Amino acid sequence: MPTNTYLNAATTLKSWLLTRDHKRIALMYIAGITFFFGIGGFFAALIRLELVTPAGDLLTDETYNKVFTMHGVMMVFFVLIPLIPASLGNFLLPLMLGTKDVAFPKLNLLSFYVYLFGSLFTLYAIVAGGLDTGWTFYTPFSTVASTSAVVPAALGIFINGFSSILTGLNFMVTIHKMRAPGLTWFRLPLFVWALYATSLIQVLGTPVVAITIVLVAAERIFGFGLFNPAVGGDPVLFQHLFWFYSHPAVYIMILPAMGVVSEVIAGMARKQIFGYSFVAFSSLGIAIVGFLVWGHHMFVAGQSIYSALVFSVLTFIVAIPSAVKVFNWTATMYKGSISWQTPMIYVAGFIGLFAIGGLTGLFLAAMGLDIHVTDTYFIVAHFHYVMVGGAIMGYMAGIHYWWPKITGRMYNEFLGKVSAAIVFIGFNLTFFPQFIAGYAGMPRRYHAYADAYQVWNVLSSAGASILAVGFTMPLLYLAWSLKNGEIAGDNPWGAVGLEWNTTSPPPTENFHTQPIVTWDAYEYPTPVEGHVV
Amino acid sequence: MRSGTVFFPEVASTMAARVDQLYLFLVGLTAFFTILIFTMFVVFMVKYRRREPNSIGARIHGGMILEVTWSVIPLLIVLGLFVWSAQIFFAFARPPAETLNVYAVGKQWMWKFQHMDGQREINELHVPVGRSVKMIMTSEDVLHDLFFPAFRVKADVIPGRYTHMWFEATKAGTYPLYCAEYCGTKHSGMIGQVVVMEPDDYQAWLTAGAQEGSLASAGEKLFQDLACNTCHRPDAQGRGPVLHNIYGKTVALQSGENVVVDEAYIRESILRPAAKVSAGFQPTMPSFQGLVSEEGVMELIEYVKSLQGPTANQAVRPTTSGPAPNENTPSQAPPTRN
């Protein structure tokens, strides 16, 4: 192990809590995200246990509603949105740019504490008072009917939003201003392009949901009536404001995962990404068109049929850049030198699950079909395929791929591959039956359901227990590797990229000498040296 | 009430088969592309697996022909899907001219249905086979959504406004109906059944249940109880507009705009009369918000809709502006004279 690393530069508690080092902040985010993933997962387990039988017999209906709300709030706001940008993005962005840190290191630390404060505040609010509105806070239920802790929970999410905005701002400035000499835009790794597109959404979209949530709180406290039809307000206005952010938020989750997939495929196949500029611009295309599709959440909410038409066609079109990425990744594999390490196994899983997740999005863009499947388990299955099958699988691939860089040690390769396989199988068993239950008519957010749907729910709950094993394993073997893993060396995969040109773990200042870039991304000029096959 | 298979709800409306066709096509498309991509990916993983520790991939940077191909073909496919799905959506969004209207009110946590002849039902809806049924719906409290899986249709039910949905049942039987928009504690208990009957059975059911008189006649009584008739007189001498023959017309507003008199406008004029005042009248009408229930509003609307034809004491020429839209029910009350 190198003697001078960001991990041993200082070891006091204070040196961690007040660090401005993007790498340490990334690790603190990983700890926070893992914590909230555990809590969200616990709520998911309660949901799946309740739904084993058609009758609502394990939890009361009130508790069940709170449980699925908490599952959604935890997973969306405190896991999926910060998932990759705040953790891997924070760690890697300065390394990939060949610089010492992000543009505003203190702001970066502030982002973390805002995240921590906002999320713990929400956690406290919903554990103490409960929240039963669903993560979507639809009015007028959330404003006039619900008796749960809507205001504190909303306040926590509002606070948390600033973390996302500040991180996005920080990353955009960093990408513009901090690139190493010679590192032009078209030499940037695709992960950086993905982070840039993500930051754009974070900065432009998050303020809208923040103000929407404030309006919900104000409506509850002061009775403004903006969303209350009894005094002339419009409950559907809330949905427009909410989805204006919350649909692009899906791309905050998936775009960075796509960036990770590009890096892992290039590194594991030791090959230039096929159609680099198409993959790069498709990220921006998704970010921009993604802002214009929110109305597809409201095809049955009484909007005009002509606006529904526009939202439908744009939703179909936003599928194209995602398809372009998948085709380019597959083409990259052609004549590669492909290693079968754990990150590659996770990426293969990502491809299969994201293909299903993306293509089932077409069912929902198709207005005439959406009428039947919206608000059923079909939707639930679709977005879990995108968010877990896409975002979480991408994150898992990335964590394994950069683990040696982050910790300086290797994880157990055999256990890694086994966990990837278990997650893939468990995931499909959990969520594939939900497509069928949904088309058969089972509405979402149902505490009790008709007997006809039981077979699918039993399969789903069985799958969830397999999935739980798949997600617990990495927690254990990765923790174990911190002390006992094999020393990784600087570049265990034999990959190119500035992050592999420094020691593992890197020193606090990232590079011993300022890198000067004279090559394109993923340029493998000669056979490279690496000790892992 | 078990119907359909574990894969599909019963096919029991004219929409159902069309929706299922699109669904099956998309299932096929999804399976084709998923298997194509995943298989290619895994085949490349196997075929091009690393054999030498230091080997690198071939130097291939891209290819414009491939990029164009795999952008344009998916684009054409999705545009085709767009047209196909939009056709189904238009059929859903535009009810036929002749419909049998049923009012629905959602409230936490029950469905209330009112038929034109006055039958009222809770959590159960009777409809005939082979007639286009239009639901005119609103909510008393929060959002709900009326979902008939066997008909492949649903629509949100929104407080403060009317939303519509129509279907034509094709097969007698009893099928589930659900609330599909989360509405609080007993959301999953806000369920019921739709009973589709052969026309003769339906007529028998109508006859057996019509004790209370038609919606329009109930509306007429309410119209008098609320003293609406003191201002809305049939002879143009009242302080409010004459309501005879007004349904379906376009009327001028004080603001200079025009509005079509439909269910939504009548409802708004009862509950928030100052919002859109007819040209030539003062905004003197008080709001009836809180004084009349959603069901009462529906009765009043049906009463106003029934005021067709010449009035008793005013020689109004037979209307020349054509029939009111969607006006039709078999139980259409005869023109009421007062």
Image (cartoon, grey):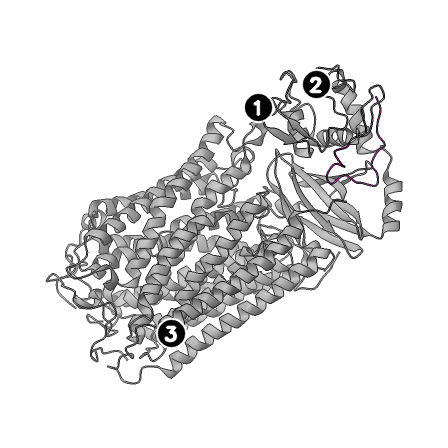
- Place of residue A513 in the rendered image (x, y in percent of width and height, measured from the top left): 10, 62
Between tags 2 and 1, which lies in front? 1
User: In which quadrant of the rendered view does residue B270 lie?
Assistant: top right
* Label 2 element class: loop
Residue B124 in the figure: left or right of residue A36: right
**Are tags 3 and 2 found on a single chain?**
no
Label 1 lies in what chain? B
Which is nearer the eye, A383 or A3? A383
Between residue A193 and residue A209, name the one nearer to us: A193
Q: Does the magenta stretch include residue B242?
A: no
Please name the amino acid that badge 2 sits on.
Gly
| x then y, percent, for residue B100 | 78, 43
Mark 3 chain: A
Residue A91 lies, in percent from the top left, at 25, 57
In primary-sequence order, the first of circles 2 and 1 is 2
Q: How far apart are marks 1 and 3 (CA)?
A: 62 Å
Q: Name the residue under label 2.
A: B240
Residue A80 appears in the picture as rendered: no
Q: Are marks 2 and 1 in contact (CB under 8 Å)?
A: no
| Residue position for label 1 | B255
Q: Do the residues labelled 1 and 3 touch (CB within 8 Å)?
A: no
Residue B290 position by quadrant:
top right
**Of discs 3 and 2, which sits in the foreground?**
2
Give the amino acid type for the residue marked by disc 1 in the picture.
Ser
Quarter-of-image position of residue A441? bottom right
- Answer few, some or many: residues within 10 Å of disc 2's Cα (few below 14, many 20 plus, some between 14 and 19): many
